[in-house]
Image (spheres, grey):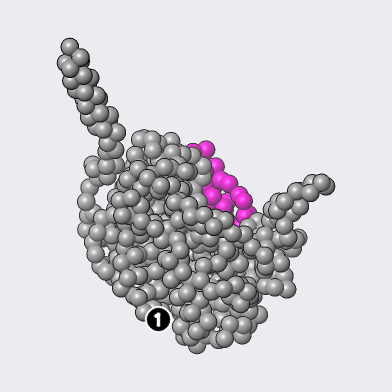
Amino acid sequence: MRLSLYIGLVAVFWALSILILQAGKKQNPFADFSSPPSAPEAQEQIKQAFLHAWKGYSKYAWGKDELCSLTKSGNNWMYMGSTIVDSLSSLWLLGLQNEFQNATEWVEKYLTFNSSNTFTSFFEVNIRILGGLISAYELSGQKVFLDKAEELGKIMAKAFDSKGFPPSYYNFATGEGNTRKEIRTYSIYGPVYSPGYYSLAELGTLSLEFSALGHHLNQDHYKYLGSQAIHLILNSFESGIFPNGIYNDLSHTNTYSVAGEGDSFYEYLVKEYLHTGSKNSELEKAAIDSINDIIEKLLQQDVAGYYYLGLIKDGEFISQMDHLACFFPGTIVLAAERLGFSNKERLITIAKELAFTCYNMYEQSDSGLASEIVNLHYGIKYPWFVDNHYALRPETLESLWYLYDLTKDNIYREWAWNIFQAIEKHAKNDVAYAEIENVNRNPPNQRGCLPSYFFSETLKYLYMIFSDEEIIDLNTWVLTTEGHPLKIKTDYTNPNLK
């Protein structure tokens, strides 16, 4: 009796286990998607997606910073028409000349930089507006863009302090700067605040745009401003990976990552070295040391062997992968091919593995879209989603483009096409596109507004992946962190970083 009961319980337990395992199996969100069509057909579909979003913006938000497609309205936070300016280089590269001309006319007639008495992110104005204008000038040769860039540059130049640090937020109407402050500790009198706090990315993501402006205007002042903070950081800290947060007195936080707050600093070490003619040995050494140190300290494998980039906080390694960090495989490829690394082949292998993990951040969600942040303590196959929303980000597609440009391996087109189909399926609406609230719902709910980088980066990288002819020759151009192409200046000299 007891034996038969025991056998029966075992059988029930076994059956329940099978049912639980089957119920727990996550269906591949790409299972019903098509394989990539021919490259020209893929490009045409991506171009139509761009036009769909552009028409929605033009109808409901023209001149505003962003389109909010769910409410059919525009949103301002820069008051500089950032979607128009940020889209200029993409409009040009996609061959949308009528739309480019309309955008050019708006820039000439309506773009101003002091129309609103509000504090705006200095970092975002630099990468979206200044970078967008200079790139449009270099691509088209139309002087209106350089004139506007010079007008903006004069305003921005007044914002730097004696160290070469820009404010985190700047009032472009009044010339007032505002730097973030953090509570360091508490005293009997209340909180004790830090001196001004800057993210590493804020300080190090100026060099491309300012050096290009200085080059075109033949004014070393701008070159100096763009590189001064980098020069100070390189001479104040041990080479390698740098702290994410730096205070005005050069004290710092104890967080290290290549995600938010750190990311584009490392990107610009590589790209400014290339942009200025591959002559600056200090930048090259800093870039090589940083990439090698990041790999040594932040690169880990999960339980299934997938590579990922975590973060270090107060000496503790955290198994967290941000989508923002998915730019890094592309930067590794670019650097390994063009800088003096002794371990080039290993770097390319690591870049491929990291890109595969980034792709899996899409494949392992229910919708086929990647969340902002995942914790990989249990591995990429069983991710713990720290931030479930999808922000139409470009970083994975950016790295897939660099890898396809290097290898011509069609797997990167296949992955990109799956991501594009997931965007079309879940983020598209009758007006344009929107962010996704929770990637682990199928179908998910849309939310928020359409960021300008969807035009300047996400769709641009998708389009370029399916180009059989090089749209951007990496021997001639570098792309800013906002996806804006800038020509390499072989005759460049910099008065600050020799």
Q: Residue at x 62, y 59 (%)?
A: 253
Question: Can you give x and y, in whole percent of width and height, for residue 94 in the image?
Answer: 38, 63
Give the residue type at disc 1. Gly
Looking at the rendered structure, the secondary structure element under dot 1 is loop
Task: Examine the image and state in which quarter residue 163 appears.
Answer: bottom right
Q: In this view, does 317 lie to the left or right of 130?
A: left
Seen from the viewer's position, the closer of residues 33 and 75 is 33
Above or below for 256 versus 56:
below
Which of the image's four quarters has the N terminus? top left
Q: Which residue is drawn at 82% across and 46% down?
A: 188
Question: Can you give x and y, in whole percent of width and height, for residue 139 in the image?
Answer: 45, 72
Q: Inspect this view and state whether residue 460 appears.
A: no
Task: Examine the image and state in which quarter residue 250 appears.
Answer: bottom right
Above or below for 147 versus 34:
below
Seen from the viewer's position, the closer of residues 67 and 98 is 67
**Residue holding disc 1:** 340
Above or below for 218 versus 440:
below
User: Magenta stretch: dominant SS?
Assistant: loop
**Residue 81 lies in the magenta stretch:** yes
Boundaries of the magenta span:
60-82
Question: Can you give x and y, in whole percent of width and height, for residue 238 in the image?
Answer: 57, 73
**Residue 362 lies in the magenta stretch:** no
